[in-house]
Image (cartoon, helix red, strand yellow):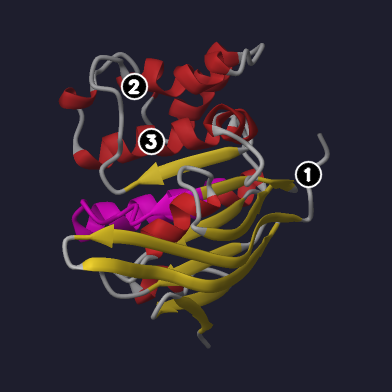
Amino acid sequence: MQRSQTVSKAVGLDKHVTGPAGGLTILEGLELEVDAGEALAILGASGSGKSTLLGLLAGLDRASSGEVWLCGEPLGALDEDGRAELRSGRVGFVFQNFQLLPTLTARENVLLPLELTDTPDAAARADEALARVGLGARAGHYPRQLSGGEQQRVAIARAYAPRPAVLFADEPTGNLDQATGEQIIELLFELRAEAGAALVLVTHDPGLAARCDRRLAMREGRLEALA
């Protein structure tokens, strides 16, 4: 399928939840477009809805109202399986807590999404991705045998191995020390440039946000442009 110039789009996006204190509006009337190859940073205070927005854009959650398009396809008409199929091979994820499967080696963690999409050269791609993040020699290690920085490198390799159109990263350096975090940032942007993928990055770090092409702030459920 030909990739749309706009890889992610939200129109009139609302998200309401019900908690112990009653109803809560997280997002309201939100509008957003992310172009192919663009690096976009979304900043905001803790609890402002940044991660909620990322989940909606990626089709991991459903909006209360409004519509989201991913790689040119509307998500509203798709069930959970349909959204998963649309993401497959087109969308990568990097999370703050790595989300590696503990019973799989580094290589197996990277290989799994490739096998699920029947990628013909899955094994070669997994090995190449691990080598690219500097973990070729650690491919047989389990997550518990890796440092936090190494686990995040595996997560980045897993995200980029399918050669996605867009990568969503949610506080990717949040659980790392400053030096390791800076290494991970460099790696993210190097691979993004090599792959030509769009990068949508949720962060509270202004320095990291400054590396992006565009910066938006989440305030009261809406996005505001930053200089």
Q: Is residue 135 visible?
A: yes
Marker disc for residue 3: 1
Q: Amino acid at mark 1?
A: Arg
130 versus 209 height, above or below: above
User: What residue sits 22% from the left and 60% below the top?
Assistant: 19
How packed mark 2 is, by other alpha carbons closer than 10 Å (few <14, some 14-19, many 20 or more), is: many
Question: Mark number for residue 173?
Answer: none
Q: Residues within 10 Å of mark 1 (few under 14, many from 20)?
A: few
Instruction: Residue 106: give its label.
Output: 2
- State the quadrant of the N terminus: top right
Seen in the picture, residue 121 relative to 42 is either above or below; the reply is above
Q: Quadrant of residue 81?
A: top right
| In this rendering, the label closer to the viewer, 1 or 2 | 1
Q: Depth check: give the residue in front, 8 or 181.
A: 8
Residue at the farthest right position: 2
| Residue at image location 69% in from the left, 47% down from the top | 74
Residue 202 at least partly seen: no
Taking the view exactly as shown, the residue that stands out farthest to the bottom is 227
Q: Secondary structure at mark 2?
A: helix
Segment colored magenta: 168-191
